[in-house]
Image (tube, grey):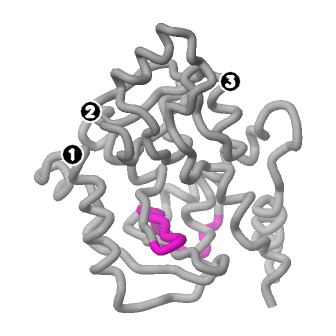
Amino acid sequence: MSTDLIEDQAFYNQKPRPSGGVSLDVVKYLNVAYNYLVGFFCLYDEGREGAWMEDLVKIVRKIFREEEIERCIPKNVRISCNIYPGICLLIGDGPSEDRIAQLGIKPLFVGRVVGVTFEGEIYPSPWLLEDLYRCTGKIRSAIEAAQQGVKAFLYGNDLLVASVNKIHGPFKKGDIIAIIDPVDGSVIGVARAAMNPGEIERARSIGRLVDVAAKNILDLGWFLRVLKPVEEWD
């Protein structure tokens, strides 16, 4: 095994700190390296890309116009499964290998995680929503979390009314939304709205600050908490 791969695996196996702040190294790794390394540890499930991609587009169509979807979503995707029982990833086109090399990372393959499937459902990945916001220049169907909410959300917790910093509509209760870090504007996870924007504002105005505003579906920390550790592979 190459030294580069050993170092990558050691980095992959780092876990979030049990208390205090989320490790900056872990967050940096998840945002940059995870997308391009994870496929090495997957088995491929051919033939289902089209159906899952259609379901993914149905979700995104509630947020963006058809021409924006056509312009901003990868045209070619493939499926990677068996990272963990019942979980598959939709991998789309990503940055060039040259760009990854400039970050000091030796990729095992280059691709972008655009969707995640588990429990029979598909969800947009945080990276897909972030790419869509960047591509269109518009943030929609999202909640910007306060800093204390970011930390809690990255550990798998729901977002409370007290931790809502800013609301980006439109969305309604039950919709899939993005959760955004207020510091750098990055998407830290995907949630299901537990209230519509008006209900969040009303809850805040009457002091119901511990009500759930958005239910955590997956966050950047989820990929460390849930995915099967590398050392368990045969």
- In the rendered image, the quadrant that contains the N terminus is bottom right
Q: Amino acid at mark 1?
A: Phe
Element under label 3? Answer: helix
Q: Nearer the viewer, residue 121 or 45?
A: 121
From the viewer's perspective, is residue 206 above or below residue 45? above
Q: Is residue 86 magenta?
A: no
Q: How many angstroms separate mark 3 from mark 1 (CA)?
A: 29 Å
- Which residue is denoted by mark 3 in the rendering? 148
Q: Please provide the residue range marked out in magenta.
A: 106-120
Image location of residue 109, percent across then percent down = 54, 74
Residue in view at x 31 percent, y 71 percent: 53
Image location of residue 202, percent across then percent down = 42, 15
Please state if 206 lies on the left or on the right of 62 as rendered: right
Please rate how many residues cluster around mark 1, counting C-alpha atoms within 10 Å: few if below 14, some from 14 to 19, many from 20. many
Say whether disc 1 or disc 2 marks the residue closer to the N-terminus. 1
Q: Amino acid at mark 3?
A: Gln
- Which residue is denoted by mark 1 in the rendering? 64
Q: How many angstroms separate mark 1 from mark 2 (CA)?
A: 10 Å
Element under label 2? Answer: loop
Q: Amino acid at mark 2?
A: Pro
Please state if 137 lies on the left or on the right of 67 as rendered: right
Q: Is residue 111 magenta?
A: yes
- Which residue is denoted by mark 2 in the rendering? 170
Image location of residue 73, percent across then percent down = 28, 59
Say whether disc 3 or disc 1 marks the residue closer to the N-terminus. 1
